[in-house]
Amino acid sequence: MNHDDQPSIITSTIDWDAPGRQVGHLNVPHSSELSAWGVLRVPVACIRGGEGPTFLVTAGNHGDEYEGPVAVQKLWRSLSPDQLSGRVILMPALNLPALLEGKRLSPIDGQNMNRVFPGDPRGSITRRIADYVTRELVARADIALDMHSGGKSLNFIPSAIVHELDDAERMTQTMAALEAFRAPVGLVIEELEPEGTLDTLVESRGKLFLSTELGGAGMLTPETVRIAERGLRNLLVHFGLVEGQIEGPATRLMAVPDTDHYVLAEDDGIFEPTLALGESVEAGQCVGRIHFPATPEREPTEHRAERGGVVFCLRPLGGTKRGDCLLVIARDRD
Ligand SMILES: [Zn+2]
């Protein structure tokens, strides 16, 4: 059921169109066992200086991905309106309940925030937050960046990510931003499941969108945090929001042009990768095996790459179920 015509019951402490530095939260009504009339307070900041574009930065869409939340919190504390030509809206904990528990999905309603956009003002709590973001924040944004990492079950070469767009001019602008982020890899990807993502929503509204996959395995490294912070700052410079230089080595442009570049598990068992993240792979090459702990006599199932390229994403967990994503191969972009 579509409730787009109904108002949101979420309120905020921020006047989104006022100048200056405002930090506060969304009040998301959440009546629970021990908090009958309680709210979830989702942190938001709006920093507005002189004339310029509006840049929406979200992180914590999945609660087990940490580079984005840390980088956005650092920016939150350091950015002042007198440095700024335009407006920056920061939401470092989009799915706050998930982030507080280190879970990919909301522990309240079990929903995946990045599958429920544009959201629903009368849906469960994750859908309500998505609806508020759609109607109040995406509506005001010219540019949006949603910072992801691999979470507990994937690990990536740190990357900034965009999609192939039909609009050639918008694609050129998007590629320029992708390169400006200066992640080790700038990737143009075909998603397995684009429906319901913030990416698809923002792109459908005709705004410029970037995402990231900055690491993963449910952890942070000094390098991935540096790449996140530098990339965020580089985009502020690229879009003319702050003065400065784009920093970092040139990005390697790569592509995952179709879903043949994904290798999915054929069986339940223990995943033994035979290649490391960043290694080259030939089409047909063995990339990993699934072993069967209850039946050691049985030969493991070999998994082969359909396409050649570089191991761009790798499952960091041994225990695996049939259908899990084991790895993704990227190739250099033509
Ligand atoms: Zn994610």
Image: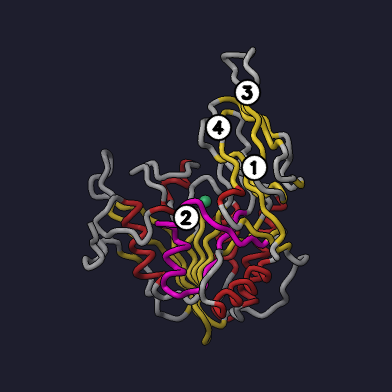
Q: Can residue 324 be seen in this view?
A: yes
Where's the C terminus, which quadrant?
Answer: bottom right
Residue shown at 52% from the left, 61% from the top: 146
The CA span between labels 2 and 3 is 38 Å
Q: Do the residues labelled 4 and 3 touch (CB within 8 Å)?
A: no
Q: In the image, which disc is placed on residue 266?
A: 4
For this rendering, which residue is in front, 38 or 53?
53
The CA span between labels 2 and 1 is 25 Å
Q: In this rendering, is residue 315 above or below 194?
A: above
- The first of marks 4 and 1 along the sequence is 4
Q: Is residue 33 left or right of residue 293?
A: left
| Quarter holding residue 234 | bottom right
Residue wearing tag 3: 291
Q: What element carries label 3?
A: strand
Residue wearing tag 1: 314
Q: Where residue 86 sits in the image (x, y, percent)?
A: 52, 81
Q: Where residue 317 sits in the image (x, y, percent)?
A: 60, 33
Closer mark to the observer between disc 2 and disc 3:
3
Q: In this rendering, is residue 156 above or below 196?
A: above
Residue wearing tag 2: 93
What span is in magenta?
A: 186-213
- The first of marks 2 and 3 along the sequence is 2
- Amino acid type for the residue under numbered disc 2: Ala
- Amino acid type for the residue under numbered disc 4: Glu
The CA span between labels 2 and 4 is 35 Å
Q: Where residue 94 sits in the image (x, y, percent)?
A: 44, 56
- The first of marks 2 and 1 along the sequence is 2
Mark 2 nearby-residue class (10 Å; few <14, some 14–19, many ≥20): many
Residue shown at 58% from the left, 47% from the top: 150
